[in-house]
Image (cartoon, rainbow, N blue to C red):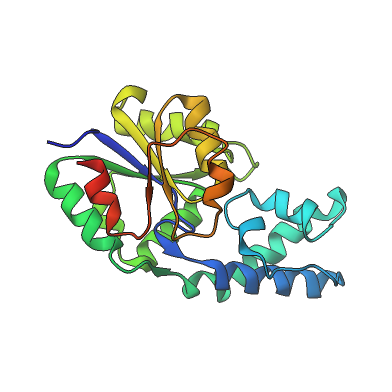
């Protein structure tokens, strides 16, 4: 018997080692737009938040070119960056055991939904999920506070029977706002110290720990 009936997984840094593809696409976007000086060495600053936040805070793009930057980024990401994704070691076995236990699973990502679907397919994990949830093209439903209720609705779940699993404080904030339990992934790109500012019930040091924390 599992503690939860509905389990929501963040994508980047939780299911997927995705930093290299995202960094590649951002660097190409900056170069194409003639912007230099952005520091992409700290993955925690841009893996997890919505893309527009990265454009604003790291790339320092003026708002009037965000749409153009988005199109350029997506072109590079679709051509090469997306194929750099790979699943964390042990995560497929966790999903397999959860699926066998009867738990309903969803991906809950701030990525554009159609791209989240593509990434999960590239990872070879699509068959384990009952829903793959992401943001809209108009940048709505990009925050976890909006994505978590959307994913729960897709699964037919309720907050008290759901848990969010993620690696950044964006995930933990969203879980707190939506009143769902949260498990922090120390193996991802975020900071456990930062996530300590928000409630979580446990920390997964590696992907294999997740199943035992949900039992």
Residue 191 lies, with reference to residue 170, above or below; the image says below
The front one of 125 and 205 is 205
Residue 211 at x, y percent in the picture: 24, 50
The front one of 133 and 188 is 188
- Residue at figure coordinates x 71%, y 50% from the top left: 52
The front one of 22 and 114 is 22
Residue 46 seen in the current view: no
Q: Identify the image quadrant of the N terminus.
A: top left
Residue 132 lies, with reference to residue 155, above or below; the image says below
Residue 146 at x, y percent in the picture: 53, 31
Horizontal side of residue 19 vs 182, given as left or right: right
Q: Identify the image quadrant of the C terminus.
A: top left
Q: How many marks?
A: 0
- Residue at figure coordinates x 70%, y 60% from the top left: 71
Residue 172 at x, y percent in the picture: 51, 38
- Residue at figure coordinates x 84%, y 48% from the top left: 63
- Residue at figure coordinates x 54%, y 34% from the top left: 198
The answer to which quarter of the image holds residue 163 is: top left
Residue 130 lies, with reference to residue 6, above or below; the image says below
Horizontal side of residue 190 vs 104, given as left or right: right
Residue 208 at x, y percent in the picture: 27, 59
């Amino acid at each position: 018997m599992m503690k939860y009936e509905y389990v929501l997984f963040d994508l980047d840094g939780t299911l997927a080692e995705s930093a290299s593809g995202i960094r590649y696409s951002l660097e190409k976007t900056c170069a194409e737009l003639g912007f230099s000086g952005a520091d992409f060495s700290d993955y925690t600053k841009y893996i997890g938040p919505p893309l527009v936040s990265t454009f604003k805070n790291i790339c320092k793009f003026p708002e009037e070119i965000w749409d153009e930057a988005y199109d350029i980024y997506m072109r590079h990401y679709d051509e090469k960056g997306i194929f750099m994704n790979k699943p964390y070691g042990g995560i497929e076995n966790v999903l397999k055991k959860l699926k066998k236990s009867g738990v309903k699973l969803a991906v809950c990502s701030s990525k554009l939904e159609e791209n989240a679907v593509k990434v999960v397919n590239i990872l070879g994990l699509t068959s384990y999920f009952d829903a793959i949830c992401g943001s809209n093209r108009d940048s709505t439903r990009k925050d976890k506070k909006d994505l978590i209720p959307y994913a729960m609705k897709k699964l037919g779940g309720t907050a008290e029977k759901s848990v969010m699993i993620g690696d950044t404080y964006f995930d933990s904030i969203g879980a707190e706002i939506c009143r769902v339990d949260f498990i922090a992934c120390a193996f991802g790109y975020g900071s456990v110290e930062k996530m300590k500012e928000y409630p979580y019930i446990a920390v997964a040091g590696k992907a294999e720990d997740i199943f035992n924390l949900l039992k």
